[in-house]
Amino acid sequence: MSSTASNTSTASNTSTASAASTTTDYDLIVIGGGPVGENVADYATKQGARVAIVESELVGGECSYWACMPSKALLRSGNAIRAAKRLPGAREAITGDIEAGAVLARRDEFVSDWRDDGQVEWLAAAGIDLIRGFGTLTGAGRVSVDGRNYSARAVALATGSVAVVPQIPGLAEARPWGTREITSADHVPQSLIILGGGVAGVEMAFAFAALGSRITVLSRGSLLGREEPFAGELVANALAAEGVDVRIGVSLTRVDRGGDGNVAVTLDSGDTLHASEMLVATGRKPAILGLGLEGLGIDPKLPVDDTMRVDGADWLYAVGDVNGRSLLTHQGKYQARAAGEAIAARLRGAPVHDAAWGRHVATADHAAVPRVIFSDPEVAAVGLTERQAREADAEVSTVEYDLGKVAGAALHADGYAGRAKLVIDEARGVLVGATFVGQDVAELVHSATVAIVGEVPLDRLWHAVPSYPTMSEVWLRLLETYRSERAAL
């Protein structure tokens, strides 16, 4: 993250606020120094606000050190090897196995060896004060940080989310890995049981299978159940092809760690599985513990308007995962850009553009959220699935196409397997959802995001000509299929 903005604050600009200060006044205090908190602070500072960030761990947050960055670094080498094996000539050049130590070392570089010096330097350059410690709300515009008290005209909560750990007998005592432990692991376990078929579970199954672990994935429902059904099916098939034991529709009754250090997992079928380690990846929830919300009569669900201002507390904002709207880093940063400028505008009495799609709102949260799962095949989607659109009572039609039949995909990899789907609001003649599954489809999702956010009519979208031969030609094939199917009605 970088900024050329200068600080307009009259307060001293140090990387860490002095512990000797008992009270420091700011226009805005942001609790949480991850990507979301950094963006709230940056965008407010650029508009002239005096801002401090409170952070109890590493500046840069979960995404930088234990989620987005390390997980993708762990995945990339395996994905590259699998891609090469799909191309004659390239596959013959692969003569050995992945060097796990080199992959872990590259991961360490991307997380700066879990040091936040660079992020702290960026805060100082951006004119944002850093207060180290755990922040708790003690009143309107008042924050206590490990016994030091600060006041501000506004406070923004950007504390992110924490892992959800299911209540299974013996699980806590067995000391399983969570997503933090697996993305920062210093070794590759011989075998690994993964509990959870969501994004983190699927991605780590691919990453550690490529690094040499024997993987078992246990999921109560279908893999990637929030996406279109074919996404989970294609990913499950790909995992099986990698030798991963994928078990759907199973529950755990007990977990134990033996004296030999191995984990034993008992299933509801009565079967017992054994592994060197176990990863629990069963979702996340907003991190609100210890913030002091209940003592101030603030709803812990933190309902917010589209400027991220908390209902009933005009001085308080909740941005990113903590408000529960969309637990994705890029979406939290989008909210942060809107919130930072909205806060600054309100503090100086300037107009706030809070109508839909205005400068100070996060309208896209409601119907245009893009997401990518870096499995192999990748899953890239935006907006609503067919099920979600129908539940919203939209007049929906859908169209699907085999990505492997697109010339650009066939050239990209031999035996290319993938699928694309559009969800269309017939009443308005626009897209409301799109899903792409296949190797390297992540770059397709932004075009769909633009089409949905811009509400581009399908008749106009027809004139967006895809370059040949690229995978983007799937847009033409989807629209051709849609026209043909509509004509047949």
Image (cartoon, rainbow, N blue to C red):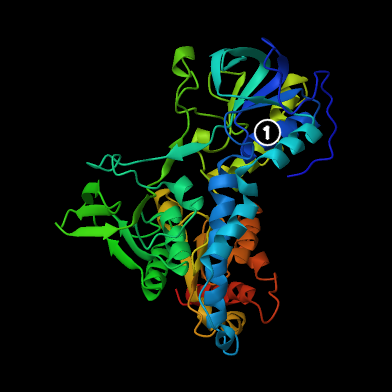
Give me the residue at 59% from left, 31% from top.
Answer: 32
Vertical placement of 1 versus 439: above or below?
above
Give 343 or 367, whichever is nearer the viewer: 343
- For mark 1, what is the residue? 40
Q: Is residue 353 left or right of residue 424?
A: right
Vertical placement of 374 versus 483: above or below?
above
Give 303 or 209, whichever is nearer the viewer: 209
Among the 4 quarters of the image, the one containing residue 340: top right
Badge 1 density bin: few <14, some 14–19, many ≥20, Cα 10 Å? many
Q: Position of residue 416 (x, y in %)?
A: 51, 80
Q: Position of residue 370 (x, y in %)?
A: 57, 54
Give me the residue at 45% from left, 26% from top.
Answer: 289
Q: Is residue 436 visible from the viewing direction of this image?
A: no
The three-letter amino acid code for the residue at tag 1 is: Val
Instruction: For the N terminus, give its image quadrant.
Output: top right
Q: Secondary structure at mark 1?
A: helix
Q: Is residue 427 visible from the viewing direction of this image?
A: yes
Q: Position of residue 229 (x, y in %)?
A: 38, 63
